[in-house]
Amino acid sequence: MRIVDLIASAGVTGFYFDDQKAIKLGAEGDGFAYKGDPVTPGFTAVRQKGESISIMLILEDGQVAYGDCAAVQYSGVGGRDPLFLVEEYIPLIHREVAPKLRGREITSFKKLAGEFDTLVQSDGRRLHTAIRYGVTQAILDAVAISQRKTMAEVIAEEYGTTLAKQTIPIFTQTGDERYLNADKCILKRAQVLPHGLINNVETKLGRNGEKLLEYVSWLRKRVFELGQPGYFPTLHIDVYGTIGMLFNEEPGPMAAYLGELAQAAEPLKLRIEGPMDAGSKEGQIQALKVLKNEMSAKNIPVEIVADEWCNTLEDIKEFVDAKSCHMVQIKTPDLGGINNIIEAVLYAKAHGVGAYLGGTCNETERSSQVCVHIALATQPTQILAKPGMGVDEGYMITYNEMQRTLALLQARKKAAQGR
């Protein structure tokens, strides 16, 4: 089977691009928008619409393989690639990628994805991570179509993994509607919740940490009010470095505060993502490791999740090798090719670190579906429900794709046993 053409179309994502630096510096909310000027290069507003590009590979038998190029909500910071805008990157895809894919024979996903993930443009630079993300999704779909298999089966066969037989725990995120949407997470019986978007000390963490402490207490209470017997979800909250800001990056006071949060959450497990932002990868690895060791010495049962400065496969390996955290977020668009995502999950698991197959609310339904197949083939600790911040839509897309694929895999297994 050959690829005869590549068609790219403009799209939107399930959320927005936000200027994280401007928000941390106190950009004032104005309805769903923000007042003030952006500070990160490329932004024209503190919040602007998320953009995506769909990659459609036309196969020689007329079938079409799909993948979506998308970038994270907080683009352009923390070592990430710049803002991903359709107007700039569709011409580049037609110029740099399409000619190299036309006429190619579809064989191994791993080989072809590796080639396009490392492709160097005519100007000597690598492709934007969002392009590598979308193109490799389409390549995986093309291989699956040509072999008449699910994308999960292709990954499992090429990487020597075992396909999941049960649902991977799904992590739902509330966005700024952290109370109303937490109810939705609980009613959906999500296994992990609520993310919470604690990205400002004054308005969300509290000048003494009291607002987050109250929120965790409320979450615990709400789980037992709305949940059924036996429902014990994990609480996973992203604090965007604000705990470090509040306690001047001092590990002792930070650990003590995390202990208070753990007590408020009992008997539910608590994970805290991004407790501080040290401003560099090396600094972040060291700061997380010191905090993790401090918590271990004090028997504080909170899991630390690495996010900021943990953007590439190489970064993830460094965080894992340093034993700096209990879990790494594999922020899917940041890694570029999905071959890197697969390897990141497998590396973390092999070294005893939790693998959070994450991403961003600022993706599309297609990238979410492809990530479900990655999860079923690699079995991470949890997978993010995406896109969007409304809970229902992202959870539906993630859950339904997972259930459809599990049902297909089970039916095929039964059919093979009956032959």
Image (cartoon, rainbow, N blue to C red):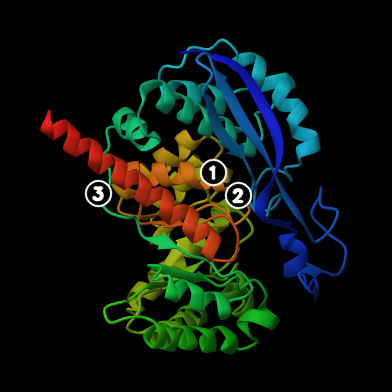
Q: Is residue 348 above or below residue 116?
A: below
Of residues 20 and 250, which is closer to you in this image?
20
Q: Separation of disc 1 and disc 3 at Cα?
A: 22 Å
The amino acid at mark 2 is Glu
The amino acid at mark 3 is Lys
* Residue 147 location, quadrant: top left
The quadrant of the picture occupied by the N terminus is: top left
Residue 219 percent across, percent down from the top left: 46, 83
User: Is mark 2 in CB contact (under 8 Å) with mark 1?
Assistant: yes
| Residue 348 located left or right of residue 64 | left
Residue 195 percent across, percent down from the top left: 52, 69
Residue 390 percent across, percent down from the top left: 59, 66
* Residue 87 location, quadrant: top right
Q: Is residue 11 above or below residue 307?
A: above
| Residue receiving disc 3 | 165
Of residues 324 and 95, which is closer to you in this image?
95
Secondary structure of the residue carrying numbered label 2: loop
Specify the label residue 367 is tagged with.
Answer: 1
Q: Separation of disc 2 and disc 1 at Cα?
A: 7 Å
